[in-house]
Structure formats: structure tokens, C-alpha cells
Image: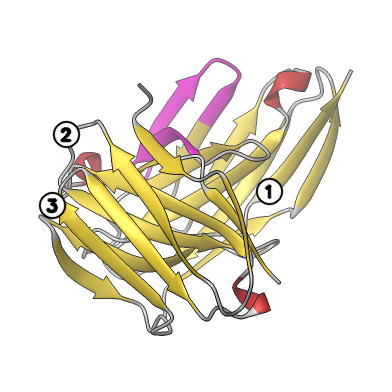
Amino acid sequence: ETGVTQTPRHLVMGMTNKKSLKCEQHLGHNAMYWYKQSAKKPLELMFVYSLEERVENNSVPSRFSPECPNSSHLFLHLHTLQPEDSALYLCASSQGGAGASKNIQYFGAGTRLSVL
Amino acid sequence: EDQVTQSPEALRLQEGESSSLNCSYTVSGLRGLFWYRQDPGKGPEFLFTLYSAGEEKEKERLKATLTKKESFLHITAPKPEDSATYLCAVGDSWGKLQFGAGTQVVVTP
């Protein structure tokens, strides 16, 4: 079982659809992250959860709604997306807490999202 | 405002031709400088973390170094399998990572 697993790997949705992205980590970490990666741009941090509490929301539009039911699972619920939301969505986890070694983030393979 | 800038944007090398990638940064309260490798269609894979100026780390053909303002990733005698996008990130005092846009490296036989 790989460390961080994301499903689905690919998703095509219309602007009126509702879908969810799933992330599961098997590393025993207590912090989880959602990033958006667009072509030629740096990874954009969207949400951070630490011990299942949301500690960061980087001005993300409300059409993106995260959920963290426990320390191993993270979801990103999507509704009424726009074409500019098409991107690679990456999930990561880390041990959390102070110190550089604890902040090493391990990434899943991502979900390639296309909004038509 | 914190900034991370990587150069060059793209690098094409012949197999065996050594080169260096640059990551310059401005951040208050640096908590680690991280290098990742990303292959097409995959998530970033952790390579190194450097914590203090003067620190160096090596892994196979890769060597990362850190100064107070920048980090270098040296690729020695690269092979085609070293082709990837290399990402640099800085950790801030809150433990968050800020990424650069990456350097795409292509190594041809």
C-alpha cells in the first residue's frame, strides 16, 4: 500500500456536477493538505488540517469544500466548478508539529480534474 | 512577502553533462529548504531537506547545498532517468511549505 493514495486519478465533470476527491494516508501522520497545481505555476496550498481541525484556508472559493473525518482520510467536495478550476489536485500528509523533519510532506499521485 | 524563485525554468542536458539548478528565497523564519522531484502524472517525491546555511546532502547523482539566500541542486553526470521537474520549497515558521514553479530537466542519451 503506497503512503498517500488519491482517488480518482482522473475526473471530468460539467460545471453543474457535484463530485468528491478522496485522499487516504497510511503513514500515521496527523496533518493533511490539499494543493492545486496548474501548468507552469507553483503549487498552491488550499487547505491544511491538523489533528482533524482545519487550520488553514487560503481564500479558496466556497465551491471547494474540504472534509477530514479522521487523521487518515481527507476529502475535497466539488460543486459548480468553473473551467479555470481544471488542474492537478494533490493531497499530502506530514507528521505535523514544530521542526523541519516533522514538516516533510509526502504527496499522493494527484487527481487530474477537467471541468467542461 | 515570502518568495521562492527557481531558475532556469527548463534545462536540457546531454547524458553525463553536469549542471546546477538554483532556488533563491526570501522568507521570514526559515524552517527548512525542501527539494522534491516530480515525474509527469505523479505527485512530488521528497528528495532532501536542508536546515542551515552550509549544509549539504547527497543522494546518488544529486547534491543539494544551502546558503542564507539560495539553494543549489547539483546533478552530476546525469542519466535519462534523472529527467523530471525539480521543485524547491521553503518551510515557514508555521510549518507551511511555499513552492517555486520548478525546473523541468530533460536528459538526452
User: In the rendered image, which residue does mark 2 sit on?
Assistant: A28
Q: Say which of A51 and B60 sits in front.
A: A51
Question: Residue at 64% across / 35% down in the picture?
Answer: B39
User: In the rendered image, which residue does mark 3 sit on?
Assistant: A98
**Which residue is situated farthest in the front direction here?**
A17
Identify the colour scheme used: secondary structure
**Magenta stretch in the rendered image:** B45-63
Q: CA distance from mark 2 to mark 3?
A: 17 Å
- Residue at disc 1, secondary structure: strand
Mark 1: which amino acid?
Answer: Thr
Q: Is B60 covered by the magenta stretch?
A: yes
Q: Position of residue B31 (x, y in %)?
A: 27, 54
Circle 2/circle 1 CB separation < 8 Å = no
Q: Say which of A16 and B75 sits in front.
A: A16
Please identify the dominant SS of the magenta region.
strand
The residue mark sitting in front, 2 or 3, is 2
User: In the rendered image, which residue does mark 1 sit on?
Assistant: B103
| Chain to which mark 3 belongs | A
Task: Give the class, few, some or many, for how many residues have Cα within 10 Å of label 1's Cα (few <14, many ≥20).
Answer: many
Question: Residue at 71% across / 20% down in the picture?
Answer: B81
Q: Say which of B76 and A23 sits in front.
A: A23
Name which of mark 2 and mark 3 comes first in the sequence.
2
Q: CA distance from mark 1 to mark 3?
A: 29 Å
- Residue at disc 2, secondary structure: loop
Mark 3: which amino acid?
Answer: Ala
